[in-house]
Amino acid sequence: MAETARTSVSRLRSDGSSTDGTADAKRRYGNRPTMKDVAARAGVGLKTVSRVVNGEPGVTPDTERRVQEAIEALGFRRNDSARVLRKGRTASIGLVLEDLADPFYGPLSRAVEEVARAHGALLINGSSAEDPDREQELVLALCARRVDGLVIIPAADDHRYLEPEIAAGVATVFVDRPPGRIDADVVLSDSFGGARDGVAHLIAHGHRRIGFIGDQPRIHTAIERLRGYRAAMADAEIEVDESWVSLGPTDPERVRHAAEAMLTGASPVTAVFAGNNRVTVTVVRVIAARTRPVALVGFDDIELADLLSPGVTVVAQDAAQLGRTAAERLFRQLDGASDAPELIELPTRLITRGSGEVPPAG
Amino acid sequence: MAETARTSVSRLRSDGSSTDGTADAKRRYGNRPTMKDVAARAGVGLKTVSRVVNGEPGVTPDTERRVQEAIEALGFRRNDSARVLRKGRTASIGLVLEDLADPFYGPLSRAVEEVARAHGALLINGSSAEDPDREQELVLALCARRVDGLVIIPAADDHRYLEPEIAAGVATVFVDRPPGRIDADVVLSDSFGGARDGVAHLIAHGHRRIGFIGDQPRIHTAIERLRGYRAAMADAEIEVDESWVSLGPTDPERVRHAAEAMLTGASPVTAVFAGNNRVTVTVVRVIAARTRPVALVGFDDIELADLLSPGVTVVAQDAAQLGRTAAERLFRQLDGASDAPELIELPTRLITRGSGEVPPAG
DNA sequence: TAGAGCCTGGACAACGTTGTCAAAAGCGCG
DNA sequence: CGCGCTTTTGACAACGTTGTCCAGGCTCTA
C-alpha cells in the first residue's frame, strides 16, 4: 500500500478552456439545483427562496418551512459566484507571501485568517517564492477574482502595476516589507532597531569582531537589519571589516560557506548576527560543529531555541501580530476609513538565552 | 511609531448585506471598466473583446491591437466571477486543515498549492481549529464558492454532510486522517506501522516500561499510533500498565502533567513515545528539566531535532508528500478519472539521533 | 361593509462574461 | 460582375443571484 514519489503532472496553465462548449449547460455544476429549482419544488416564487436563504424578513413561517424543506431535499447550496457578480463584494481577501512552509509565515497567515474570519471573509493565499513575476501574476489573478482586499508580503520592488487596482477600490496592505514605488499602508517590524539592539548586546558582552549574515540585498528587511548592525558598530566606534558582512540567498549551502569564511578568515569573528530564521538555523549548525565557542544572536525566534545548549538568543518579532495588525488595517479600509497610507512599525524583543552572552574567544 | 496589541474588532459574521441597495450600480467595483467599456472605446463589438482577452482565434491583428490599447488605457481586468458563473469552473480548490500555524501543515499546504498552481488553480484555505462545526462551516462556504475540489484534513468524524456536494461533482480528497461515514479518497501516513516501529526501537534498546502520550482519542491518528504502540508492546510480550498511556489535548500544560505523572508514578517509565510534534516538543522540555535520562521517540520530525543533546529520534512523515499526493489525486478526479475511492498510505521513516537510543535508567 | 394600510409573494431587470449563430466583409473564380 | 466560399465580426441569450417594484390578500377601523 506504500507508495513513493510521483512526478507532478505539469500541464498548460491556461484557463482550461478546453473548447467543450457543446456540453449541456445543466451539466456544468454537475446538475446542481438552483433557486429556481427550489422555488418550483416549494411552489413559491424565486425571490421568496432568495429571501429565505438570506434570512430576509417578510416570509410567513409556513412558507419558510416549505422552502427549507425543498432546500434540504434538493441539497441546494447558494452559488456565491452569482451572488458576487450581483453584489460586487466577494467577502474574500488575498494573502501573497513568500513561502507558506516557512515557519515565520505560518502564524502570520493564521492571524490574517482569523481576522478575515471575524469579518466573514475567506482567505485565498499564494506563495510568490520570492519571485517578482510570480508575485505579480498571483496578485493580478486575485484581482481578477475581485478579492475585496490584499495583504502582500512583497517580493517585487515595483508595485506600480497595482495602481489601477487600488484606484478601482481593492484595499491593500503590505506587511513585513514596504511596497516599491507606490504609496500604501505598511506594517513592519522594527528591523533596524532590532538588529541594532541585538548587535549592541553582543558588543556589550565584549565582542568587537562581529559578523553579519543576511538575506539578499534587494530585500528591504535585509538592508534594514544590516543598517542596524552598522549603526551599533558605529555607536561603539568599531570599524567594520567588510569580510564580516555577507548578504545573499538564505539556502543552507550559501549560509554555511559565508559563516565558515568569516569564522576562519584573516580577521575571524567571535560572534555572528544572523539576519533571519533561515540563517540562524544554519549558523547554529555551523557553530555546533566547531570546538571554539562563537556567540550568536539571530533575528526571528525559532522553536526549541531555548533547548539548545547554549540556548539561542534572538531578536524576536511577533509574526502573528504583524498579520493581525495588517488584516485589521485592511478591514478598516474596507469599512470605508480613508485615512492616508500609514506606516506601522511593531517593536521587536530581545530574548537572551545564552548564545548571545558567550564571551569572545581567542 | 511602535504599537502594542490591539483588540480584534469582531463583528457580525453575516454577509455584510448592509442594505445599501441604493448605491449606484457602477459604483460597486469602484468603477471598474468592463468588456463593454473596452468595446466602446476600441469601437468594436463586445464579443471581439472577449476573443482578444481569451486569445481566441479569428481576430485581425489590427483589431486586436486596437482592443489591446483600449484594455491598457482603461486598466481593464476581466471579472472572473462572471466568467465562473458562465463557465462553471472556478479554477480554485479549497484546503481545510487544522491550523496553518502548525509547522506540520505549512509544508503540506505549500505542496498542495504547488500542484494547484501547476494546474492553473488558486488555493483557498482555512483552519478548522480542530472544531467539527467550524470544519463544516468552512467546507460549505467553500462549496458555495463552487471550488472545483476540496482537500480536507478532517476534524469532524461524520462527513455525510458532504454527500450532496460530492454528488454534485466537487472532487474531494482527505489527508492525514480518514473521513467519517462516507467513502472517499484518503492519503495517510502509516501511523500504525510508524508508531509500532518507533516503540519497537525503544524496546530493542532495552526499555520495557514505555509511556505513550498522544492526541485526543477522537482523532484517528492518535488511535492508530496508540494501536501501533500496543502492537509493539504485545510483540515483545510486555504487559502495558495503563498509567503509561495518556491521550488528550496536546497543549503544553496537559502534556507536561501527563509526562510528569508517568515519570514519577508507582511504575515509572524509562522511555516515552510522543504521538505528534506538539507532544514531542513539550516532552523534550520535561525531560531536559530532569536529571535522570529518559529515552524519547517522537512521531513527526521537528526542526533542529538534530541539534538538541541528545538529538531527538523521530518517526518522520513527509508532510509535503502527503499534500502533493492528495492534490494530484484531486486533479486526477477533476480530469475525469472516475476510479473508485482509494486509500493511499505513505511510509514513515525512523530517524535515529540519540534520544531513542538512551538506555533505560533505574 | 368599504376603504386604508400593511404584509407577503412574485415578475423582471440587472450584474459581466461566454457560447451560439447569423450577418457582413473579403476573396477567388467563372 | 455575380456567385459561392472563407474569414471576421457582432447581436443575443444564457449563467444564478439580488434589488426594485407592483399586485394581491389580509387586518383593522370607521
Image (cartoon, coloured by chain):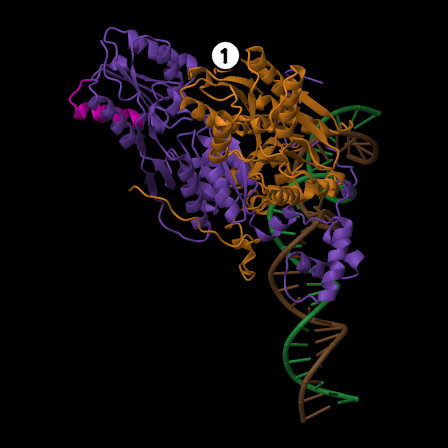
Chain colours: A orange, B purple, C brown, D green
Chain designation of label 1: A
On the picture, is B188 further left or further right than A360?
Answer: left
User: Hey, which quadrant is residue C5 in on the image?
Assistant: top right
* Residue A42 visible from this viewpoint: yes
Give the camera-side residue of A340 and D10.
Answer: A340
Highlighted range, magenta: B225-239
Quadrant where the image shows the N terminus of chain A:
top left
* Residue B10 visible from this viewpoint: no
Which residue is outermost to the front? A266
User: Hey, which quadrant is residue C9 in on the image?
Assistant: top right
On the picture, is A200 further left or further right than B137?
Answer: right
Q: How many numbered discs sit on the rendered protein?
A: 1
Q: Main secondary structure of the magenta part?
A: helix
Q: Label 1: which residue? A: A359
Give residue A204's position: percent from left, percent from top.
58, 11
Is-magenta flag for residue B237?
Answer: yes
Q: Residue at x 40, y 36 (%)?
A: B175
Q: Secondary structure at mark 1?
A: loop
Q: Residue at x 25, y 24 (%)?
A: B199
Give residue A161's position: percent from left, percent from top.
71, 43
Give the camera-side residue of A41 and B1.
Answer: B1
